[in-house]
Image (spheres, rainbow, N blue to C red):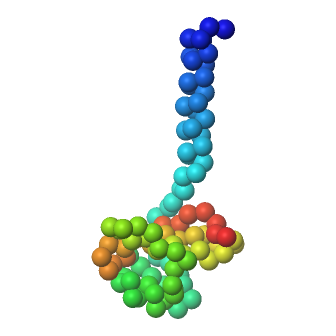
């Protein structure tokens, strides 16, 4: 097999491989309208202090400009991603099941 033939086979294979790996690492998130926590329901527009009061401290916090609070309620429940801008909840999303 010539060098050009190897490249014509190897390059498309590598591209497909890396696309497959990157897509399997991506988290599919779905928008939801609210999140029910132990002390109440949070909705888009709620303040950070309201969310803390109803849901407690998040499992982790991410981001710089838009802050994302992650709530992982365990392996039998979905993970929730709450996106804040300034002090207000702008978006609620679910991901896969937690840990």
* Quadrant of the image occupied by residue 17: top right
Image quarter of residue 33: bottom left
Number of callouts: 0
The location of residue 27, given as percent across then percent down, is: 54, 56
Residue at the image point whose x is 56% and y is 63% from the top:
95
In this orientation, does residue 91 appear?
A: no
Q: Quadrant of the N terminus?
A: top right
The extreme top residue here reads 2
Whether residue 95 is visible, yes or no, is yes
| Camera-side residue of 68 and 36 | 68
> Looking at the image, is 91 positioned above or below residue 20?
below
* Residue that sits furthest to the left in the current view: 86
Q: Is residue 12 above or below residue 56?
A: above
Residue at 56 percent of width and 46 percent of height = 23
Q: Residue 52 placed where, x, y %?
A: 45, 87
Q: Quadrant of the C terminus?
A: bottom right
- Answer with left or right where residue 17 lies relative to residue 47: right
Residue drawn at 57 percent across, 18 percent down? 7
Residue 86 image offset from top left, x and y in percent: 30, 76
In the displayed structure image, the side of residue 89 where residue 77 appears, left or right: right
Outermost residue toward the right in this view? 76
Residue 37 is situated, as x and y percent measured from the top left of the image, at 54, 84
Residue name at image x 60 percent, y 70 percent: 78
């Amino acid at each position: 097999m010539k060098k050009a033939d190897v490249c014509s086979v190897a390059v498309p294979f590598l591209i497909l491989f890396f696309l497959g790996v990157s897509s399997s690492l991506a988290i599919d998130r779905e928008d939801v309208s609210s999140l029910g926590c132990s002390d109440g329901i949070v909705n888009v527009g709620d303040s950070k202090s309201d969310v803390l009061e109803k849901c407690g401290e998040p499992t982790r916090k991410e981001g710089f400009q838009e802050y994302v609070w992650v709530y992982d309620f365990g392996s039998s429940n979905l993970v929730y991603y709450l996106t804040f801008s300034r002090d207000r909840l702008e978006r609620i999303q679910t991901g896969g099941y937690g840990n």
